[in-house]
Image (cartoon, rainbow, N blue to C red):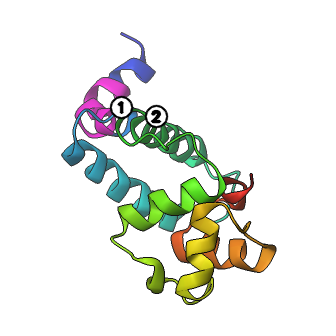
């Protein structure tokens, strides 16, 4: 057995959880925690020897999210409606976007979201602005 394979075999039980796709929420949470720890160590150094491991772990988490928590294929007012439902908000719960009547008009299609409102929504929900574009 080559030296590289012997080293990998000796450490595999520690490394394997970082390379395998999560199969449960517990696996997912553990991988997120490990990635957070790794990113603290790596920082912004894209040349760090473990940067490719961090990228791989991020890809595994993203794939799990896409399988387990798919984003609905909606835009604009429908995305706002979905996020409000997801977060248990009513029309008066978004003062940074507008009054209850403004939110009502947006949800009913009588009014479109403007740039300021989209910025407020992306800041509040941490989602990309293009999700609110019609």
Residue underneath mark 1: 21
Look at the numbered disc 2 and give the secondary structure of its residue: helix
Residue 109 falls inside the magenta stretch: no
Q: Residues within 10 Å of mark 2 (few under 14, many from 20)?
A: some
Which residue is nearer to you in this view: 66 or 94?
A: 94
Residue marked by disc 2:
63
- Image quadrant occupied by the N terminus: top left
Magenta stretch prevailing secondary structure: helix
Q: Position of residue 114 (x, y in %)?
A: 78, 73
Q: Please provide the residue range marked out in magenta.
A: 7-17
Q: Is residue 10 magenta?
A: yes
Image position, residue 17 (x, y; %):
29, 37
Q: Nearer the viewer, mark 1 or mark 2?
A: 2
Name the residue nearer the viewer: 24 or 50: 24
Compared to residue 127, the image places residue 10 above or below, namely above
Which residue is at 70% across, 62% downward?
Answer: 129
Is residue 59 shown left or right of residue 121?
A: left
Query: Answer yes or no: do the residues labelled 1 and 2 have beta carbons within 8 Å?
Result: yes
Residue 75: image x %, image y %?
A: 64, 50
């Amino acid at each position: 057995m080559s030296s590289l394979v012997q080293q990998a075999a000796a450490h595999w039980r520690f490394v394997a959880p970082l390379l395998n796709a999560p199969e449960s929420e517990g696996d997912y949470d553990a991988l997120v925690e490990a990635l957070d720890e790794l990113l603290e160590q790596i920082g912004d150094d894209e040349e760090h020897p473990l940067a490719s491991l961090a990228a791989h772990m991020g890809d595994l988490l993203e794939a799990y999210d896409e399988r387990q928590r798919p984003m609905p294929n909606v835009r604009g007012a429908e995305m706002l409606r979905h996020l409000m439902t997801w977060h248990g908000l009513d029309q008066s719960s978004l003062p940074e976007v507008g009054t209850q009547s403004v939110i009502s008009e947006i949800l009913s299609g009588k009014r479109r979201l403007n740039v300021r409102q989209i910025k407020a929504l992306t800041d509040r929900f941490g989602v990309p602005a293009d999700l609110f574009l019609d």
